[in-house]
Amino acid sequence: MIYFLILTALTFLSYFFVDKSVAEYFLANIPSYEHIGDTISILGESHWYIGTAIIGFIFFKYFKKNKLFEQRFLFLLYINIFSGLISLVLKQLFGRIRPWGMRGDSDDYGFLLFQNFDLGILEKMKYHFATVLESPTTYSSFPSGHTTTVAAVFTYLIILFPRHLYLIVSAGIVIVSSRILANDHFISDIFAGIMVGSFSTIYLYSKFKDKIHENI
């Protein structure tokens, strides 16, 4: 509980005091950082982990039968799908513009969810979803999907390999930080993604822990 409270506090603090200035810095230095961020970000794409989960599950279920490994790879698939769906819904709900939406003379910043209250509830909702549907990539910054994936998978790795905690956390920090360098996310998006991803794994782990630890 304390872990999630700290992340929530960091999300709010980042939004109000850090996000915009950090984003403006990296936008002003695109040639130095964006390519590096884009390259490292590849490691946060969910299809790598979903593909690995499917292949591993099929292999240990039908070829080299091992119930424990079969369940572990199935769990890997579950956490990716579950965390991904939560992230997708939140992205549409909050409708936050990405850092690169601030390029040029644009001063757009913030969440569609908390704007345009002067339109009235129905008109606001209509405008919100019309804008998100028209520019789904631009208004999908919060939470970070790549970070959600990394947090979900790496939390699982920590559960399986607690001795390598520091190595796993260090690698995770490098990957999720790349989203800031790539101008795809604000710092608060990262903290939110960590919350969604780690919560997803911890929640599903509470339901399936016997299956991934017991060698049947």
Image (cartoon, rainbow, N blue to C red):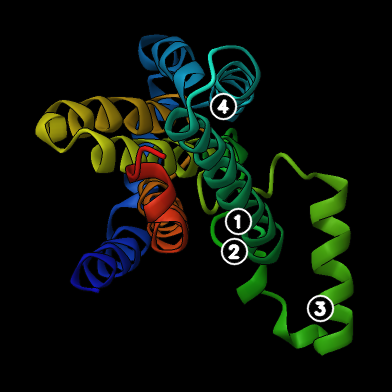
Which residue has dot 3 on it? Answer: 124
What amino acid does circle 3 point to? Lys
| Alpha carbon distance from label 4 to label 1 | 31 Å
Residue 128 as seen in the image, left or right of residue 50: right
Q: Secondary structure at mark 3?
A: helix
The three-letter amino acid code for the residue at tag 1 is Arg
Upstream in the sequence, badge 2 or badge 3?
2
- Give residue 116's position: percent from left, percent from top: 72, 77
- Find residue 138 and report its horizontal and vertical position in percent: 69, 42
Please name which of the two marks, 4 or 3, marks the residue nearer to the observer: 4
Q: Which residue is mark 1?
A: 96
Amino acid beneath label 2 = Phe
Q: Which mark is residue 53?
A: 4
| Mark nearer the N terminus (4 vs 3) | 4
Position of residue 7 relative to residue 72, above or below, is below
Which numbered tag is attached to residue 70? none
